[in-house]
Image (cartoon, rainbow, N blue to C red):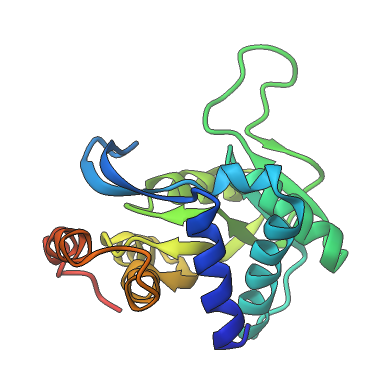
Amino acid sequence: MIESSLEELVKDIYLAGGFRIGEFKLTSGGVSPYYVDLRILVSRPRLFERLVDSYISRMRTIGEDFDVIAGVETAGIPIATLISHKTGLPMVYVRSAEREHGTGKMVEGELEDGNRVVVIDDVLTTGRSIEGAVKAISMAGGRVQYALVFLDRLQNGVKRLREAGITAYSVIDVKSFLKILFENMLIRDPEYEKITRYLEGFSSVEE
């Protein structure tokens, strides 16, 4: 995705309410001064399509052929669905927990032994949810070496996944996202500095 298009996408995500500043408790248990909510974009079809197009562009730079797209419950599912529709690649999705009824499967959809799978999620924080999805896919016979998200929060998720044998890619990281917002005067100096200080606490991230 060309740089100007990505900048416009970031600004529009912010204006749509997809980036909020405040105090938010994360799934990981930590408290963050910002929150990225890409789930709301499903209510804005054209903007959501542009988000998905950014994934497809980034996916093509990985330089690998994939047999299946896998969406992580819940935010990754609609993203993976539209990627599948636009690329023609089959899709599965991975539940966050086993069901106690029906088939009890963690991976829904058709997955054959040896299928090369790329895991799709919205945001990368610690990498725990993607790691769990990879394990479920592997147990179902799929092969996963890559994961793709829109935003990397730079909180050691890439490092954790690398240690698990997974290479994680992102369309953009939070520092670049913030820079676009700041340079376009969408966030103020105090907000920018507060989030930047927060990010410094995760300085052990390996690019």
Nearer to the camera, 173 or 103: 173
Q: Which residue shows up at 34% across the image and 78% down it?
A: 183
Image x and y of residue 27, in percent? 34, 36
Residue situated in front as seen by the camera: 159 or 32: 32
Q: Left of 187 or right of it: where is 44?
A: right
Residue 114 visible, this angle:
no
* Residue in the image at 63% along x and 82% along y: 1
Instruction: Classify residue 202 by image quadrant.
Output: bottom left
- Looking at the image, is 68 positioned above or below residue 168? above
Residue at screen point 61% across, 13% down: 100
Q: Nearer the viewer, residue 7 or 99?
A: 7
Q: Is residue 3 visible?
A: yes
Left or right: residue 63 compared with residue 85: left
- In the picture, residue 174 is in which quadrant? bottom left
Numbered circles on residues, count: 0
- Quarter of the C terminus within the rendering: bottom left
Q: Residue at x 11, y 60 (%)?
A: 201
Question: Along the horizontal axis of the image, is 38 left or right of 143?
Answer: left
Q: Measured from the top left, where is residue 50 in percent x and y?
A: 69, 66
